[in-house]
Image: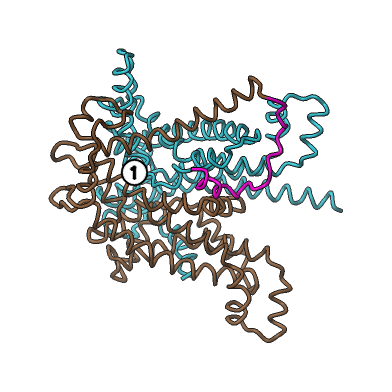
Amino acid sequence: MIMVSVGVFVFGIIYSVLLSFTNAKLFPKFNFIGLDQYERLWGETRWLVSVENIWIFGVLIIVFQMTLGYLLAVFIDQRIKQEDAFRTIFLYPFSMSLVVTGLVWQWMLDPNLGFSSAMQKLGFESFVFAPLVHQSTAIYGLVMGGVWNGVGVTMAILLAGLRGIDAEIWRATRVDGIPAWRAYLYIALPMIRGALATALILQCTSIVRVYDLVIAMTQGGPGIATQMPAIFVIEHITNRQNVALGMAAASMMLLPIVVLLAIKSAADWHAKSRREQRAA
Amino acid sequence: MTGIATTAGGIAKDRPRGPRPRRVTASRVGVYGFLIIAAIYFLAPMWVMIVTSLKTMPEIREGFLFNWPREVSFEAWTKAWSTACTGRDCEGVRPGFLNSVKITVPSVAISVVIAAINGYALSFWRFRGAQIFFAILIFGAFVPYQVVIYPLIIFLREIGLFASLPGIIIIHTIFGMPILTLLYRNYFAALPEELFRAARVDGAGFWSAFFRIILPMSVPITIVAIILQVTGIWNDFLFGIVFAGRENMPMTVQLNNIVQTTSGVREYNVNMAATILTAAVPLAVYFISGRWFVRGIAAGAVKG
């Protein structure tokens, strides 16, 4: 089984990448036509919108999860009595499916009966907050749901990083009279690089994969406003019956992960050789 | 609440090491203010789900999203469980629940057993190519699923298991392998190797060393692995929609179908009740096992 699993990843990837150079429609046929599918892919509005969306979504998710996650971790680190209660609350959304997350936020952001109407009923007559109904703002609604679901994990990882910092360092900052916020920003933050990298990699993989959240929250709409690469691939291998084009898109999805892992292993290798140098 | 909450955490068991606050100050109030506002943001959707599911449709149409229902009604819950419609089928989320159980239980059992043996072989029985093998597995944990879904569809079609229960179980087992093997291998790598050497000297072979020495010590990591897999597989949507077929549709897929169904009036209370029902299993796992749950995320992530 484990061999099957490794085999699936190795052969599956090779198979998919090879298919992307063919003109397979419904069934896999290895009739190679070079880079035509890639050319077509980058000429399709649907794909271009997907790529733009994943950048907006990805950057916003990382920015919000990192800042909010670190803030939560820092605030929880202030010898809070109810630490466990707060931690449980911040992390529970992550245990639920992204489908559940998407459906809840779809209802929360309902233009007629959701948050918007609740605020209007409270007396804020002109209050309107319904990002999901407009093409230009729907993607921000997705970010709200995504952050809600995942920020707890970032918090947990960064908090673990903070707790790993030597107590001596904190004592030294106090002796030097450095204010707490500066200590957290300029001293602690660089020291938890490892935790930050872990959180970042986890965020990136989940961003590239994002599928359920979009399907549940907007179905890729309104129009094609919230299409994502993951949806593009699935659509082309199931409903649209253009396997080769789907595989070209899938190969493009693989690219950022490969780059990211290459950077990570290069950094690891660099750190390791530096450590060895110092030891020698 | 605190009874449940004290079990959470674990990833950061140590005491806080931040600067110790001197007394109740403005900044202290600020800290609590921030945390409470954040807690409200996290809890609001859950609150809305619960109150919406207990309201009647006329009350929902009044538009007071956050209010507690004037009269509590459980009608939406029974409807969501057994009679809500998706297209022509009107059986609620119950069949989906049963399907999810049928998918989750064998998938978790098989994947955990294989991963345990595999992690053991990787850490104690160094074989040729183990490093490369392991590198590929780690890579597998990060590969976007879309890249390998199509080859898997072809593969399962060839062996006649596409859109079947065994098919989806195989899929979950395959995709559970990287992270679980990683989990076990890192756990075993931290165990003292003398234990294993001693067993070898006493003449224990591959299996007897595994069952008598390693397995009894793997209880904690096995709990973590089971939690990780139960929540992961229960919450899966993509594999369910692609590989399970109409007969074995898991609960998440059925929930989505019920909520997004375009025929008839949208019943928000029924939708929210169905949503809570779908989230119930992983939520229960989370609240019962809080500390272990966090450890699972951390163990999978930190060394990845």
Task: Please indicate, yes or no, whether residue B203 appears anywhere in the rendered image.
Answer: yes
Query: Which chain appears cyan?
Result: A
Q: Which of B125 and B64 is in front in this view?
A: B64
Would you say B215 lies left or right of A239 here? right
Main secondary structure of the magenta stretch: loop
Rendered position, A118 above or below A21 = above
Q: In the current view of this chain or complex, which residue is farthest to the bottom?
A: B203
Instruction: Please say whether residue B5 is one of the residues in the magenta stretch.
Output: yes
Rendered position, B151 above or below B72 = below
Q: What element carries label 1?
A: helix
- Residue A33 image position (x, y, % from top left): 36, 52
Q: Name the image quarter holding residue B248.
A: bottom left
Q: Which of B166 and A248 is in front in this view?
A: B166
Task: Please indicate, yes or no, whether residue B121 appears anywhere in the rendered image.
Answer: no
Q: Report the chain holding disc 1.
A: A
Q: Which of A51 and B25 is in front in this view?
A: B25
Q: Chain B is drawn in which colour?
A: brown
Q: Residue at x 73, y 24 (%)?
A: A179
Q: What stretch is highlighted in magenta?
A: B1-23
- Residue B188 image position (x, y, % from top left): 63, 66
Instruction: Please say whether residue B39 is one of the residues in the magenta stretch.
Output: no
- Check disc 1 and report the residue beneath it: A232
